[in-house]
Image: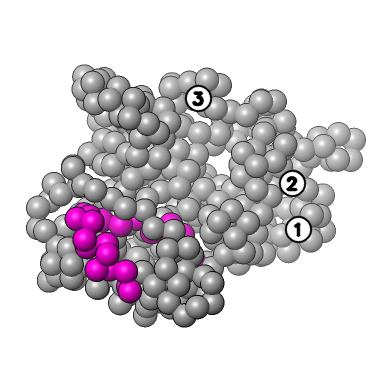
Amino acid sequence: MSKNSRVAKKSGLSEDKNWWRQAAIYQIYPRSFADSNGDGIGDLQGIISRIPYLKSLSLDAVWLSPFYPSALVDGGYDVDDYRDVDPKLGTLADFDQMLKELHKVGIRVFVDIVPNHSSNLHIWFKEAIAAAPGSKARSRYIFRDGRGINGELPPTDWVSHFAPSAWTHESKMGGKHNQWYMHWFAPEQPDFDWDNPEVEKEFLKTLKFWSDRGVDGFRIDVAHALKKDLSEPLRNLDVFEDLEERGDKGKGILADRDEVFKIYKSWRKLFNQYDPTLLASQWLKQTFMQVVYHCMQALRLSVSASISDLSIRLSRQLPTRQACRKHWP
């Protein structure tokens, strides 16, 4: 695809390609920001009604938390459909109107994308639960046989963010086969298997879907955890894998693995097909990894955990360049 002529260039947006370097970005949680119809739920028309207020804040961009169809097990980060708007919040037409009106007043729009996991109500996971072990449908997620005489124990002792175990037996979701599926968050948020090329192709389609509508960038949820060490036998870890456990060598089990940068290299290739190029950002605690994700050939923006983290990152310019050369030769 050749460079696209962006709708945004016909709007009130600045044409400064470096606008993002000192940008003020305002997060909006759509379900609570503004309710346009009195049903007690914020919606896209509510955001449109508050554009004069947003303009008064002298913002460069807004970041929309998930507005997709969701059962809200995790506040919308359990996504049922990545290419639609939750009917409670509005329609795709409402989204297009909101985007156009924000652009008119010079405010760019970032949307949340959640590539580490879907919800258990996503069509792919429904297909996976109904399918047999070893099937194409199951290969999109991380299914494994259990340990123990009859597979009654989870495959590993991995710990999730939201539950004691990062594994749930499929019977809890209506499955009839004796396997377990992996979820680094809630059981209703099964992790995709990003070793499967079909998963990467599907998300490139999703990124293009929203990019073609005119969004200016993406905030990537759990950006560091798409690639996991799924080589057999699976490595065991009976404590939550945080920064101390995985370190900064790109060899952890569940996150910050070197292979994840290949994914973002393909995303950057897609983003660069738009004029102006799209941006992507992520939230990270680890200063060293902020440096790597921030490389110009990767995501460009990083959201720091604290002011002290930010000051450390900015004071390490030489390691920044070295890290970028390692991952983006």
Pointers 2 and 1 in contact (CB under 8 A)? yes
Task: Relative to 162, say whether 49 is above or below.
Answer: below
Task: Quote the CA–CA distance across marks 1 and 3.
Answer: 31 Å
Q: Amino acid at mark 3?
A: Leu
Q: Position of residue 64 (x, y in %)?
A: 38, 59
Amino acid type at mark 2: Thr
Left or right of residue 82, residue 164 in this image: right
Determine whether 63 is above or below 52 in the image: above
Q: Is residue 60 left or right of residue 70?
A: left
In the rendered image of this protein, does residue 109 appear above or below residue 154? below
Residue depicted at 70% across the width and 25% down the height: 238
Classed neighbour count for the residue bearing mark 1: other residues with Cα under 10 Å, few (<14), some (14–19), many (≥20): some
Q: Which residue is nearer to you in this view: 57 or 63? A: 57
Q: Residues within 10 Å of mark 3 (few under 14, many from 20)?
A: few
Magenta region: which residues?
48-68
User: Is residue 101 one of those drawn in magenta?
Assistant: no
- Where in the figure is residue 283, as x and y percent of width and height? 40, 40
Instruction: Tell me the SS state at disc 1.
Output: helix
Question: Which is nearer the N-term, disc 2 or disc 1?
Answer: 2
Name the front one of labels 3 and 2.
3
Q: Residue at x 72, y 31 (%)?
A: 157
Closer-to-camera residue (98/121): 98
Find disc 2 in the rendering and name its residue: 168
Q: Secondary structure at mark 2?
A: strand
Q: Residue furthest right?
A: 149
Vertical arrangement, residue 100 with respect to residue 119, above or below: below
In primary-sequence order, the first of circles 1 and 3 is 1
Q: Is residue 178 left or right of residue 19?
A: right
Identify the residue position indicated by label 3 in the image. 243
Check disc 3 and report its element: helix, strand or loop. helix
Location of the C terminus (image quadrant)? top left
